[in-house]
Amino acid sequence: MQDTATPNTDQVPAEAPTTSANAYAIDRLSQAFESSAKRWELIVYPSLFAFIILAAYGFYLVFSLAKDVHYLAISVDTNMTVMASNMQAISSNVAQMSQDVRRMTTNVESIAQDVQALRPMLASLQQMDLAMRNMTVSTASIRQDMAVMNNSFSRPMQFMNWFMPW
């Protein structure tokens, strides 16, 4: 049973007019909206604060990345300038080396022609070598003949040397 002294707020009294029912419904809607808004405030405000912190950190990261890319571009530009000057030096060195190889080719061709001119001299040297061998053989023969002659004279001379006093 219901006590009539404490009215139930969940139920609208039957004898109340329709304007009072509308006011009561609006009051309930207002209370529900306030409680819902308070719940949303507990979620939305910290989320908004976290979003602002994350957005600021994101801006810092993008700004830092842009600064690093700027330094990288300056470094690459400097290194490319140095590398371009080194490539020019390499190109001039290769051109100089090409000229040196051309000169060496000319010198090798000249040496080849000189060797061709030396071929007749080689034939003369071969003839001289043959003559020197013949002279060596003749000298060896003379030496052998001298040894034989020394042997032939040494025995009679030894006999005569016994008679000579000096």
Image (cartoon, rainbow, N blue to C red):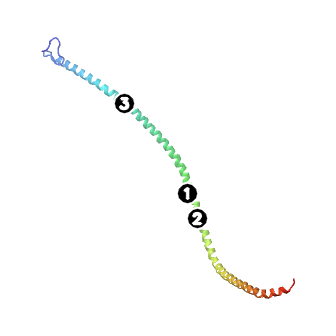
In this view, the residue in front, 126 or 101, is 126
Quadrant in the picture for the C terminus? bottom right
Q: Hey, what amino acid is under mark 1?
A: Ser
In this view, the residue in front, 22 or 157, is 157
Q: Residue at position x 34%, y 27% from top?
A: 46
Mark sitting earlier along the chain (3/2): 3
Q: Toward which corner of the image does residue 66 lie, by quadrant?
A: top left
Which mark is on residue 31? none
Marks 1 and 2: in contact by CB < 8 Å? no
Which residue extends farthest right?
Answer: 165
CA distance separating discs 3 and 1? 59 Å
Q: Toward which corner of the image does residue 21 lie, by quadrant?
A: top left
On the image, numbered disc 2 is attached to which residue?
101
Q: Hey, what amino acid is under mark 3?
A: Ala
Q: Is residue 79 above or below residue 98?
A: above
Element assignment for label 1:
helix
Q: Is residue 148 above or below residue 67?
A: below
Quadrant in the picture for the N terminus? top left
Element assignment for label 2:
helix
Q: Residue at position x 55%, y 57% from top?
A: 91
Mark sitting earlier along the chain (2/1): 1
Q: Residues within 10 Å of mark 1 (few under 14, many from 20)?
A: few
Q: Residues within 10 Å of mark 2 (few under 14, many from 20)?
A: few
Q: Residue at position x 38%, y 30% from top?
A: 52
Which mark is on residue 50? 3
Q: Nearer the viewer, mark 2 or mark 1?
A: 2
Residue 159, position as x, y percentages in the image: 81, 87
Which mark is on residue 91? 1
Mark sitting earlier along the chain (3/1): 3
